[in-house]
Image: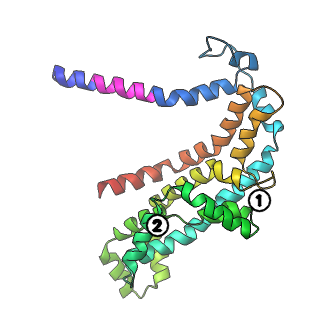
Amino acid sequence: MSFRHFSTKVFRTIINTLLILIFFFPFYWMVVTSFKTLGATVLFPPELIPSSLQVQSYLDAFHAIPFLHFLVNSLIVTFSVLVLQTLTIVPAAYAFARYSFKGKRILFGIAMLSMMIPAQLTFLPLFIMFSKLGLINSYASLILPFASSAFGVFMLRQTFKQIPSELIEAARLDHASEFRMLCKIFLPFAKPTLVTLGMLAFISTWNDYFWPLVLTTSDAVRTLPVGIASLRNIESGIYYNTMMAGNIMLILPIIVVFLYAQKQIIRAFTYMGGK
């Protein structure tokens, strides 16, 4: 190994380590703060490694708001969005990938253009529409705007188009129906992509704060991000440890889902990147 090659490798290792520390530090600080006492959170200079740890902040966050109620609302909204997106993007992607029909390019172009429209532009028309339909402060207003995904249609279509034609012709010679080919060939082949899309939809819906905030007028259907944000308004003062504990409980399901699905996500991006 030459000196130049060795020095380049050391330099890259140092840069990568610094980048990891920069990205990881905010998460570390959130976790550490959640286990500190209230007095320890306002010390200056701050303690990078707390002298004592306590879990009272988690109990305070759990009891300060109707945590289970917000959690159930988040689960209902998130899993409803996941089911509806699966039911809409799979047939749409299958049709765009395997059928030729009049207006196909125009429809696909409209779907792609919809990804370029900022959400802020569609907020007001959607709000007015749901208001006139009397759906403000309902599960429908939190679920229906996200029932489909143009990005999901595009990504799944690209995956479906990579299936060898010989495999499809063999299935047709075996008199397999379109539904059977979709279930036995296309969906198993696209499993990493489906898992990735599901993960992205789960994260975006679970973490969504803006839409549940403006489309709800009471705690009846509000989701967990809105509930956690209300921790800063409890009584007087700001309890940083309680707020951090609430945020840890908010992102915990995302971490669990990601750890469970990470192999499929890596496979999906590795396969698509190799094409």
Q: Position of residue 53 (x, y in %)?
A: 71, 20
At mark 2, the secondary structure is helix
**Tag 1 residue:** 137
Frontmost of labels 2 and 1 is 1
Q: Main secondary structure of the magenta part?
A: helix
User: Which residue sits at x=44%, y=85%?
Assistant: 176
Asked whether the viewer can see residue 129, the reply is yes
**Tag 2 residue:** 153
Label 1 sits on what residue type? Asn
The residue most toward the left is 2
Which residues are drawn in magenta? 10-20
Q: Position of residue 214 (x, y in %)?
A: 70, 52
Q: How many numbered callouts?
A: 2
At mark 1, the secondary structure is loop
Asked whether the viewer can see residue 80, the reply is no
Cα gap from disc 2 to disc 1, whole angstroms: 29 Å
User: Which corner quadrant of the image does residue 135 belong to?
Assistant: bottom right
Q: Quadrant of the N terminus?
A: top left
Who is closer to the viewer here, 114 or 252? 114
Q: Position of residue 138 (x, y in %)?
A: 76, 62
Residue 176 in the figure: left or right of residue 260? left
Q: Earlier in the sequence, mark 2 or mark 1?
A: 1
**Vertical relation: 92 (above or below) 46:** below
User: Which residue sits at x=35%, y=57%?
Assistant: 272
The residue most toward the top is 45
Task: Report if residue 48 lies within the magenta region.
Answer: no
User: Which residue sits at x=44%, y=77%?
Assistant: 95
What is the basis of the colouring in this image? rainbow
- Residue 169, disc: none
Label 2 sits on what residue type? Val
User: Which corner quadrant of the image does residue 59 belong to?
Assistant: top right
